[in-house]
């Protein structure tokens, strides 16, 4: 079975650019009310995913280094989102991945980034979309007594 029909395309997906400032990333995440967003580079290549926790760790580390816990959002303008990306977190799948590969990933991730053969980000597949697909394809059988 092909996973292409489950993809929410890039044009319908919120994402960050790796050169966005941390402030821009925080604002975009807040605006869309997501807990994680994929990050792409200037060529559209998938770089990784950042989460609310990544932003929180960044802010706490900045404040602890400065000896204060007050947060001035303007201080986050000089660092880029790319510093928040963790290696091997929320790995992508190729557009030709099998449903089995996708299911393995979605058990660990809320969404799975999808890339083409060149590594270019084409969209995401959410856990919710996969569950919706299976509940419509395989509805509960009628129980007999």
Image (cartoon, grey):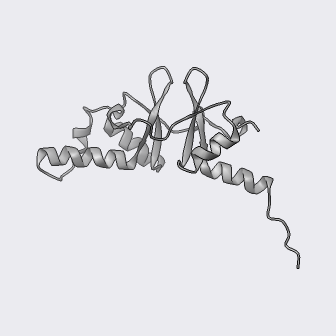
> What is the x, y in percent for residue 42?
45, 21
> What is the x, y in percent for residue 27?
38, 43
Q: Is residue 94 left or right of residue 19?
A: right
In the rendered image, the residue lying farthest to the bottom is 145
What is the quadrant of residue 41 in the picture? top left
Q: Total of numbered circles in the picture?
A: 0
Q: In this view, does 98 lie to the left or right of 23?
A: right
Locate the C terminus by quadrant.
bottom right
Q: Which of 41 and 76 is in front in this view?
A: 41
Locate the N terminus by quadrant.
top right
Q: Is residue 1 left or right of residue 142?
A: left
> What is the x, y in percent for residue 38?
48, 37
| Residue in view at x 53 percent, y 47 percent | 109
What is the quadrant of residue 39 in the picture? top left
| Residue in view at x 54 percent, y 35 percent | 92
| Residue in view at x 45 percent, y 34 percent | 48
In the rendered image, the residue lying farthest to the left is 67
Against 119, is 27 above or below? below
Q: Is residue 142 left or right of residue 91?
A: right
């Amino acid at each position: 079975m092909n996973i292409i029909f489950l993809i929410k395309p890039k044009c319908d997906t919120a994402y960050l650019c790796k050169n966005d400032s941390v402030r821009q990333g925080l604002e975009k995440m807040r605006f869309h009310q997501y807990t994680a967003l994929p990050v792409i580079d200037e060529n559209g290549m998938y770089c990784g995913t950042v989460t609310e926790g990544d932003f929180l760790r960044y802010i706490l580390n900045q404040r602890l280094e400065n000896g204060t816990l007050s947060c001035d959002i303007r201080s986050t303008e000089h660092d880029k989102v790319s510093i928040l990306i963790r290696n091997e977190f929320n790995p992508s799948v190729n557009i030709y991945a099998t449903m089995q590969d996708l299911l393995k990933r979605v058990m660990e991730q809320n969404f799975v980034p999808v890339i083409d053969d060149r590594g270019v980000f084409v969209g995401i597949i959410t856990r919710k979309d996969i569950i919706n697909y299976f509940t419509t394809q395989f509805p509960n059988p009628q129980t007999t007594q």
